[in-house]
C-alpha cells in the first residue's frame, strides 16, 4: 500500500522537515510507504554534487524574483522548484519491492530511479506527450517526432507516435529533429533502504526561472513543460492523479489517497514551522545520493 498525500504549496524548508519526520517513522515501521505530492514556492536547490557556478543569477536578482536558495542532501546538481511544477517525495522502504527480474528481494537505487522515470513517462503518455530516456542522463525527456518536408504535405507536430510519423515518410524525404527537452528532474537520497527527495515534473512551470541556473549542470538541452508541449493549459490535479495511478502500476501497489498528514499519522504531525538551523545534513556511510 502506498499512501498519497497532497500538501498543496509548501515552503522548501518545511518540506524537508516533513520528509525528515516521515523517514524516521518509516525506518521505525510506524508508517507504511508514503508519496507526498506538492508544489514549492520559487526555490533553487543544490544537491550533493552541485557546482555553485551553475547558479548564474546574482543574489540580488534572485531576491527580485522572489527565489530562495538552499542546499540539500539529495543527489544531483542545481535545479529549480516553483508553482506549476508537481514535486513528488516518495518515502519508501525499498525492501518492500522485489527487483523486476525477481532475482532480488530488494530493489537498488538504480532500479528505483528507473522506476521513477517509468512513472513519469507513463504520466506524460496519459497526456499524449511522447518521452524517452537519454543514455547517461537521469530524468524524463521529450521524444520529438521529426519534421518532414513532403512538398505540399507535412507531418504535424502533434503526432504522438513515432511509428505514425515513419508511415508518412518517403524514402528520400529530408527530416529535421527538434531538440529533446527535459520535462522532469530526479534526485534522491536513500538511508537504511528508506528513500527521500524524489522528482519534479514541469506541468505549467514558468520556464524563465530556469534561466537563473544551469539546470542539472546540462548546457546542451533545454528545459520544457507539459503545457508547452501540449500548447494548452493542464489541470495539476489531473496530472497528480495520473502520477499516483502510475505509481500503483509501476510499484505494483495499491494506492490510498489520504487527505492530510494528520490523517496519515492519526495524530498531530508536530512539524516545526521554522526552517531548520542546518539544511545540509552530514553525510553518513549508509546514505546514498543519486541523480
Image: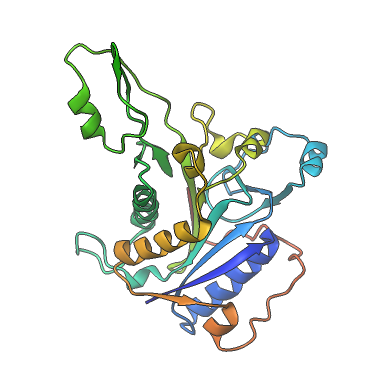
**Which residue occupies 35% across, 61% down?**
246
Q: Position of residue 143 (x, y in %)?
A: 35, 35
Is any part of residue 197 visible from this angle? Answer: no
Q: Along the line of sight, which residue is nearer the eye, 184 or 164? A: 164
Q: Is residue 41 left or right of residue 258?
A: right
Q: Would residue 265 appear left or right of 3 to someone viewing this image? A: right
Q: Quadrant of residue 156?
A: top left
- Farthest residue in the front direction? 152
Which residue is pictured at 36% across the width and 31% down the height? 144
Residue 174 position (above or below residue 234) = above
- Name the one closer to the observer, 164 or 28: 164
In the displayed structure, does residue 263 sit left or right of residue 120? right
Q: In the rendering, at what x and y percent does residue 263 appear? A: 55, 84
Percent coordinates x, y for residue 26 in the rendering: 49, 77
251 and 26: which is toward the camera = 251
Residue 136 vertical position relative to residue 83 in the rendered view, above or below: above
Whether residue 95 is visible = yes
**Where is 131 relative to 170, above or below?**
below
Residue 104, x across and y down, in percent:
24, 65
At 42% from the left edge and 68% from the top edge, which residue is drawn?
193
Amino acid at each position: 500500500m502506498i499512501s498519497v498525500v497532497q500538501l498543496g504549496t509548501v515552503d522548501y524548508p518545511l518540506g524537508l522537515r516533513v520528509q525528515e519526520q516521515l523517514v524516521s517513522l518509516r525506518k521505525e515501521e510506524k508508517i507504511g510507504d508514503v508519496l507526498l505530492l506538492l508544489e514549492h514556492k520559487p526555490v533553487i536547490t543544490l544537491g550533493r554534487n552541485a557546482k555553485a557556478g551553475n547558479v548564474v543569477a546574482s543574489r540580488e536578482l534572485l531576491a527580485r524574483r522572489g527565489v530562495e536558495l538552499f542546499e540539500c542532501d539529495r543527489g544531483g546538481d542545481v535545479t529549480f522548484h516553483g508553482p506549476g511544477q508537481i514535486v513528488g517525495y516518495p518515502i519508501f522502504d525499498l525492501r518492500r519491492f522485489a527487483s523486476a527480474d525477481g532475482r532480488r528481494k530488494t530493489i537498488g537505487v538504480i532500479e528505483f530511479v528507473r522506476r521513477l522515470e517509468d512513472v513519469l513517462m507513463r504520466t506524460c503518455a496519459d497526456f499524449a506527450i511522447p518521452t524517452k530516456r537519454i543514455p547517461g542522463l537521469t530524468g524524463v525527456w521529450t521524444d520529438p517526432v521529426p519534421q518532414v518536408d513532403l512538398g505540399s504535405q507535412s507531418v504535424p507536430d502533434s503526432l504522438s507516435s513515432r511509428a505514425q510519423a515513419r508511415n508518412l515518410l518517403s524514402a528520400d524525404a529530408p527530416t529535421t529533429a527538434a531538440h529533446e527537452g527535459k520535462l522532469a528532474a530526479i534526485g534522491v537520497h536513500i538511508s537504511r533502504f528508506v528513500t527521500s527527495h524524489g522528482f519534479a515534473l514541469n506541468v505549467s512551470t514558468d520556464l524563465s526561472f530556469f534561466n537563473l541556473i544551469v539546470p542539472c549542470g546540462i548546457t546542451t538541452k533545454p528545459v520544457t513543460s507539459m503545457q508547452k508541449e501540449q500548447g494548452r493549459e493542464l489541470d495539476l490535479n489531473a496530472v497528480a492523479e495520473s502520477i499516483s495511478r502510475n505509481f500503483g502500476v509501476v510499484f505494483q501497489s495499491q494506492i490510498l489517497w489520504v487527505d492530510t498528514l494528520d490523517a496519515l499519522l492519526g495524530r498531530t504531525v508536530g512539524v516545526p514551522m521554522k526552517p531548520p538551523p542546518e539544511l545540509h545534513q552530514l553525510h553518513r556511510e549508509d546514505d546514498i545520493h543519486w541523480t
